[in-house]
Image (cartoon, rainbow, N blue to C red):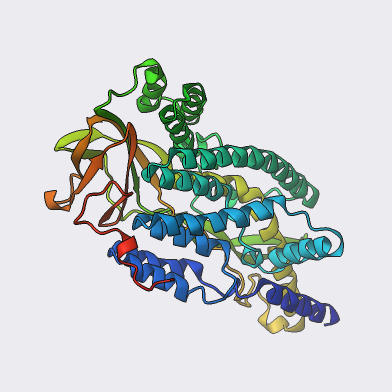
């Protein structure tokens, strides 16, 4: 009884430290926001985002989501402001080195909280692919605004972050493997009854080099350096993109064409970037885990594991019409694949923590069986309201990135997608030697991002009114 009291007191302290993270249904909150975005109501989406985050100290996810919504509506200054806040938060956590008692308390609280309850108690620091895609999206914002020098800084930051993540990941995976061995854990995610194993073992997921490097990030770097006249730096970007996504003719062509002459004075080298859909949602599924307490007693505990739920409502797009002519689009990045690969790589650590909770639940049930033998059960009967996987993830991050490249005469040009009416397209102005046409599509909506758009289409910057002013 005294032991149970101490555990309850510890849990109470951890919950106070964790704030309301354990009580939020983040997936449900963001689904409401995404529903408004899917109707084209970006202002309403921003309102809901703020409504669901009423506290003064906003968390990392708030700034990630806010930046993406503002970017879709071409409010690029405020989008960059939100994303720079998110980037600074990530940077501070990467550089932080708490010392002494506070470091011990933080580590103890985090480990005990996630072991005894679930991962929702941990502060959300962002998945590695989200950190890399953040600076990539920031660079894309700059390029859409014809600021190639500004994009260069964010591209450099992306490369530095990838290097840091690579070092951290190698150490984390080694620690997870050692911990599993020391605990005698032999359970593999393929052994989880009822868990959708196939999605984690899909060829496009397994073939990825890792879960955080993006071929699009490196291709974008190559294009930016090429536009800045630094072709010696452009080549490594294109080569890295090819290494990450081999066999894509579009990427190989960019490397071959580096020796070709630049655009004439009346021409522009155009990179069309189409980002479609939303990053996958993260949901929770309960799996029965048998816990062998002794040779004669095995008790089954229902334990929650995270699963990824891809966006299937945004229609596939394979080409874009430029002045009525089809331009094929090449898909060079899928955040869904990156998220699946990340989850696949994280499963050993997730299983290790889940097994601890399963053992605690099984032991508690065995004690309950001894107290009430007439109600004895070989399955944990007490429902744990905290037994749910962490469903937090950057939901408004675009999923697929598709690209095309062409040379156009300077002047006005018309863009549209094949499944929209002709009047739903965009008229854009070409007036730079190199330009990026950035289009954002999700569900039944499409948006042109950047100042090259010719009115009457109105960017979000003209429509936000008093929202978050």
Q: Percent from the top left, x then y, of residue 52?
A: 48, 74
Please state which of residues 356 and 138 is positioned toward the viewer in this rendering.
138
Residue at (20%, 37%) from the top-left corner? 411
Residue 282, placed above or below residue 452:
below
Q: Percent from the top left, x then y, of residue 277?
A: 35, 52
Residue at (43%, 56%) from the top-left corner? 77
Query: Image quadrant for the C terminus?
Result: bottom left
Res 459 quadrant in image: bottom left
Residue at (50%, 68%) from the top-left corner? 26
Res 3 quadrant in image: bottom right
Query: Image quadrant for the N terminus?
Result: bottom right
Can the viewer see residue 247? Answer: yes
Residue 251, placed above or below residue 415:
above
Residue furthest top as drawn: 259
Locate residue 373 relative to residue 124 in the image: left or right.
Answer: right
Q: Percent from the top left, x then y, of residue 175?
A: 75, 45
Locate residue 133 relative to residue 464 in the image: left or right.
Answer: right
Residue at (61%, 39%) from the top-left corner? 160
Residue 266, placed above or below residue 79:
above
Res 389 quadrant in image: bottom right
Residue furthest front as drawn: 265
Mark count: 0
Locate residue 126 relative to residue 320 in the image: left or right.
Answer: right
Please state which of residues 201 and 71 is positioned toward the viewer in this rendering.
71
Please state which of residues 423 and 453 is positioned toward the viewer in this rendering.
453
Q: Percent from the top left, x then y, of residue 159?
A: 58, 37
């Amino acid at each position: 009884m005294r032991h149970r009291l101490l555990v309850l007191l510890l849990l109470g302290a951890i919950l106070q430290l964790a704030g309301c993270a354990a009580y939020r249904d983040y997936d449900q909150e963001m689904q409401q926001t995404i529903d408004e975005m899917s109707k084209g109501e970006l202002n309403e989406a921003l309102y809901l985002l703020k409504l669901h985050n009423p506290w003064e100290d906003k968390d990392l996810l708030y700034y990630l989501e806010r930046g993406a919504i503002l970017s879709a509506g071409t409010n690029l200054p405020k989008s960059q402001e939100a994303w720079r806040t998110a980037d600074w938060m990530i940077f501070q956590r990467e550089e932080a080195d708490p010392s002494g008692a506070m470091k011990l308390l933080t580590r103890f609280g985090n480990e005990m909280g996630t072991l005894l309850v679930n991962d929702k108690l941990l502060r959300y620091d962002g998945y590695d692919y989200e950190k890399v895609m953040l600076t990539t999206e920031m660079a894309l914002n700059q390029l859409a605004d014809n600021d190639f020098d500004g994009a260069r800084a964010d591209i450099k930051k992306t490369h530095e972050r990838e290097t840091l993540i690579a070092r951290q990941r190698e150490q984390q995976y080694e620690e997870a493997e050692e911990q599993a061995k020391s605990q005698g854990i032999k359970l593999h995610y393929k052994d989880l009854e009822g868990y959708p194993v196939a999605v984690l073992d899909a060829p496009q997921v397994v073939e990825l080099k890792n879960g955080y490097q993006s071929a699009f990030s490196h291709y974008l770097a190559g294009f930016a350096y090429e536009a800045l006249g630094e072709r010696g730096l452009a080549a490594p970007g294109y080569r890295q993109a090819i290494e990450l996504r081999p066999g894509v003719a579009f990427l190989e062509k960019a490397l071959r064409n580096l020796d070709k002459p630049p655009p004439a004075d009346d021409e522009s080298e155009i990179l069309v970037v189409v980002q479609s859909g939303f990053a996958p949602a993260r949901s929770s599924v309960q799996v029965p885990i048998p816990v062998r307490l002794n040779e004669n007693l095995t008790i089954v505990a229902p334990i929650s594991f995270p699963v990824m739920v891809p966006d299937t409502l945004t229609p596939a797009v394979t080409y874009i019409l430029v002045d009525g002519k089809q331009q094929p689009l090449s898909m060079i990045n899928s955040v869904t694949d990156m998220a699946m690969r990340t989850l696949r790589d994280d499963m050993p650590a997730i299983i290790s923590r889940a097994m601890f909770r399963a053992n605690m639940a099984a032991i508690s049930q065995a004690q309950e069986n001894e107290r009430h033998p007439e109600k004895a059960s070989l399955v944990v009967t007490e429902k744990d309201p905290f037994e749910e996987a962490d469903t937090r993830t950057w939901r408004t991050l675009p999923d697929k990135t598709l690209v095309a490249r062409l040379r156009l005469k300077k002047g006005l040009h018309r863009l549209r997608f094949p499944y929209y009416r002709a009047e739903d397209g965009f008229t854009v102005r070409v007036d730079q030697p190199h330009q990026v046409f950035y289009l954002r599509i999700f569900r039944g909506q499409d948006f042109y991002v950047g100042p090259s758009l010719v009115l009457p289409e109105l960017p979000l910057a003209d429509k936000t009114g008093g929202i978050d002013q």
